[in-house]
Image: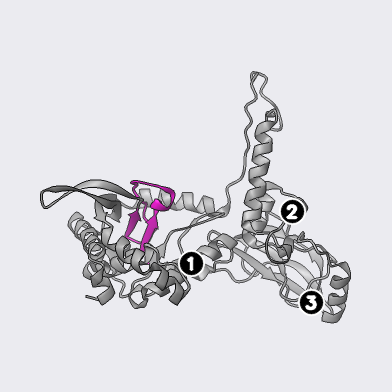
Amino acid sequence: MIIQIKVPPLPESISDATLISWQKEIGAPIIKGESLIDLETDKVVMEVPAPESGHLTHIFKENGATVTGGEILATFESITHTEISNTIEANKKHEYSKPSELSPAIRRIVLEKQLNIKQIKGTGKHGHLTMQDIQNHLKKDDHRTETKTPITTRLNNDEVSANSHETRPQKRVAMSRLRAKIAERLLQTQQHSATLTTFNEINMASVIAIRNEYKSHFQDQYGVKLGFMSFFIKAATEALKQYPIINASVDNNDIIYHGFYDIGVAVSSPRGLIVPVLRDTDQLNFAQIEKEIATFAQQANDGTIAYEDLIGGTFTVTNGGTYGSLLSTPLLNPPQSAILGMHTIKEQAVIEKGEIVIRPMMNVALSYNHCLIDGRDAVLFLKAIIANLETPEKLLLNL
């Protein structure tokens, strides 16, 4: 039976996708559910699985093509599972060298860097390649490149500048859809909102003390580490209840007050920064928050995060302190009206009751849309977060 392989329905806010790569060749045996194609949207990389066991007969769209929902990509002939299994078993290799067996995130890096995966030793289960294997291989390549005499990269139809007597290599790489979308949204934010940022600092001593005392017991009981992010998510949620305008958004000339608390958490991925959303944070406890964040981080790294987890959100928290940032001005994540920036914790001299003492301090920044939020509300909201974190017992006791 001949089956048409089509682009799956795309979310309402996404008009098209880019065909990154075909994972199977025409005639190659395929088992039902195996990945045929990787499609990249503005948010995620999607896999198109084989609808049945069989093989591709025709491919109509090549790598790099822009496609829309429902568009025909190929035709597929289904055959019995037994025939496919026998063929695959006969050709089975012990090495992990098939592109179709790689996660979407790893496949994209392999394609972008033009890596030969047969030259990379996999350390994962059954010899599977991991993201760490790829990163280690790239580091070795960088080291080898640095020890060789650089070669001038050819630009503009491979013509080398006649005026250049030095070796000045350059490389031109197309932006991924995600990176291009991030750039577009950042420009839109600056053009369509009056963004201001207010700063303050938090004495993290109480949070650190609680975390140090209970982190081992917490991990033993819940199977996840107790981080700082869960404290900030709970503190922000309680502050949003006090100042609902921070949780609101603008739609033309209307203000939309959201009666729920969906907080985005900025997560780094091989494709760039993404913001998965924790839903109904007022109903989540510390363990549930930490587990969801850990799951999002793993999915972001593997390239398997669902589009549904990246949409919506009424507020965002980003932690530049993970990379050592001491102070920054986070940019809004439209249509949200505010974003909280966390930073690294540094011991500083502060004055308490007339005495100079050393305390673990964190700078925090709240960027907000001044078209909707007044400075007073922004400052008081940030102070409410600080109060919640400097007396975390209130969060734990729901006071």
Q: How crowded is mark 3: few (under 14 residues within 10 Å), some or many (20 or more)?
A: many
Helix, strand or loop status at disc 3 = loop
Labelled disc at residue 53: 3
Is label 3 or label 2 in front?
2
Give me the residue at 67% from left, 43% from top. 140
Labelled disc at residue 227: none
Q: Tell me which numbered mark, 3 or 2, is placed earlier along the sequence.
A: 3
Residue position for label 2: 117
The part of the chain drawn in magenta is 313-342
Is label 1 or label 3 in front?
1
- Distance between the alpha carbons at the discs numbered 3 and 2: 26 Å
Q: Does the magenta stretch include residue 329?
A: yes
Q: Tell me which numbered mark, 1 or 3, is placed earlier along the sequence.
A: 3
Say which quadrant the N terminus sits in: bottom right
Question: Which amino acid does the dot numbered 1 rest on?
Answer: Ala
Residue position for label 1: 294
The location of residue 327, given as percent across then percent down, is 33, 46
Give me the residue at 59% from left, 62% from top. 302
Q: How many marks?
A: 3
Q: Does 286 appear above or below 381?
A: below
